[in-house]
């Protein structure tokens, strides 16, 4: 349902409500809503989440349970900001802008690199919106730091940080750290990601952060390959890097705390045969015992894994476990699919076609 005019929280909620009612979807089947964490979406009273909870309460539907989830991908992006060392990024951005902002400088720089038979033809431009590209910008800047310094001096400018060992060390650490975050982000992307798999990837990353912090303190740079390539790094710098990694870990704890409450449900979904019966809700205990004693289902779980295993779970025999697993699989851990859809719509509206009506957009939406 298109939103025309304003897009306040009430407008968004009315559009969402209209879509649900138009499709005749039962409200008691609504299990969760993934948002980008904006106040208009998450405000307890007047945000879309608050209005949705009020709507569900007014229906007086027994047994209904609704969860609001802050997109894991968006939360990772927020956590990554604690790693963006401002004193390093400011120098990089200022230097790149000096070369790219003026056409003459840019042309002369590319010609200069060509004359030196450089491996790369130019510096990459930094786009703040596309933070995933930062690692490529940092790697390229590090690779061309000597050529960049020479070119800047030819222009009667000075960027002393380009030959400063501490700055170079900080740049390399930032490059390796951003690369690790980039790897995590790519794991969290995709259309068929189950929320438990996404949460497992984040938990794994948090464990890695703890390990990296200890290793940096001890001078072990095995997981920071670019930093390790510099040779000896001052203990003072290593302590600072360990503190940054520790702060990043704390940021993940803060931003992902809403997933902590769902962890018992995730464990039951992911490892039903390893769960202790006393640790699950009493109404599910008899079903869980029967499931764990079923050798055929246990072998099927081993063969196909999660979530395919639940295709073989009988709804008649295990109604509570079936319902619980369906709730987990229906949850969206991120707004990835929504953002991908809007990207496709944007291309269709602004690139491929100049005039589209709502009818055309509905047809395009079906194709997406």
Image (cartoon, rainbow, N blue to C red):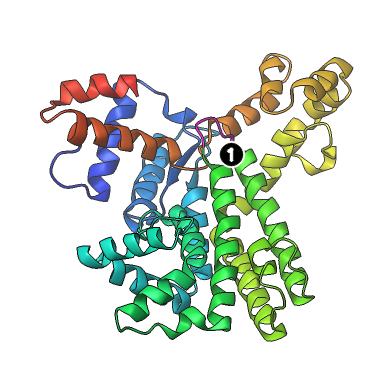
* Vertical position of residue 261 compared to residue 111: above or below: above
Vertical position of residue 313 compared to residue 18: above or below: above
First to last magenta residue range: 190-195
Identity of the residue drawn at 65% across and 82% down: 237
How far across and down, in percent of the image, does residue 272 sit?
78, 32
Residue 9, given in percent of the width and then of the height, sits at 27, 49
- Camera sees residue 283: yes
| Residue 190 image position (x, y, % from top left) | 51, 35
Who is closer to the viewer here, 142 or 279?
Answer: 142
Residue placed most toward the observer, 203 or 16: 203
- Camera-nearest residue between 291 and 229: 229
Residue furthest out toward the left: 355
Q: Which residue is mark 1?
A: 195
Q: Is residue 102 visible?
A: no
- The answer to which image quadrant residue 131 occupies is bottom left
Query: Residue placed at 30% from the left, 28% from the top?
Result: 19
Q: Residue furthest front?
A: 115
């Amino acid at each position: 349902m298109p939103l025309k005019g304003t897009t306040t929280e009430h407008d968004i909620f009315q559009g969402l409500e209209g879509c649900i009612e138009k499709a005749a979807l039962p409200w008691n089947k609504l299990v969760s809503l993934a948002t980008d964490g904006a106040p208009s979406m998450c405000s307890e009273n007047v945000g879309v989440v608050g209005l949705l909870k009020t709507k569900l309460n007014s229906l007086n539907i027994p047994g209904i349970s609704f969860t609001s989830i802050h997109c894991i991908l968006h939360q990772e992006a927020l956590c990554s900001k604690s790693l963006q060392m401002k004193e390093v990024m400011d120098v990089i951005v200022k230097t790149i802008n000096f070369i790219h902002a003026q056409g003459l400088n840019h042309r002369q720089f590319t010609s200069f690199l060509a004359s030196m038979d450089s491996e790369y033809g130019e510096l990459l431009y930094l786009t703040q919106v596309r933070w995933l590209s930062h690692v490529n910008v940092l790697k390229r800047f590090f690779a061309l730091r000597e050529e960049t310094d020479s070119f800047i001096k030819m222009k009667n400018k000075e960027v002393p940080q380009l030959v400063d060992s501490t700055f170079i060390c900080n740049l390399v650490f930032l490059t390796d750290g951003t690369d690790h975050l980039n790897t995590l982000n790519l794991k969290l992307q995709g259309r068929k990601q189950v929320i438990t798999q996404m949460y497992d990837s984040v938990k794994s990353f948090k464990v890695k952060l703890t390990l990296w912090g200890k290793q940096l303190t001890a001078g072990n740079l095995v997981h920071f390959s670019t930093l390790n390539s510099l040779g000896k790094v001052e203990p003072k710098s290593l302590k600072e890097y360990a503190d940054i990694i520790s702060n990043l870990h704390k940021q993940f704890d803060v931003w992902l705390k809403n997933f902590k409450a769902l962890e018992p449900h995730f464990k039951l979904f992911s490892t039903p045969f390893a769960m202790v019966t006393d640790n699950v809700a009493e109404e599910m205990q008899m079903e869980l015992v029967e499931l764990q004693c079923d050798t055929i289902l246990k072998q099927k779980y081993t063969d196909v894994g999660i979530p395919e295993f639940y295709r073989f779970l009988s709804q008649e025999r295990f109604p509570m476990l079936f319902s619980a697993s369906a709730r987990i699989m229906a949850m969206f851990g991120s707004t990835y699919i929504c953002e991908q859809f809007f990207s496709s719509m944007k291309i269709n509206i602004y690139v491929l076609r100049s005039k589209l009506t709502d009818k055309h957009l509905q047809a395009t939406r079906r194709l997406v």
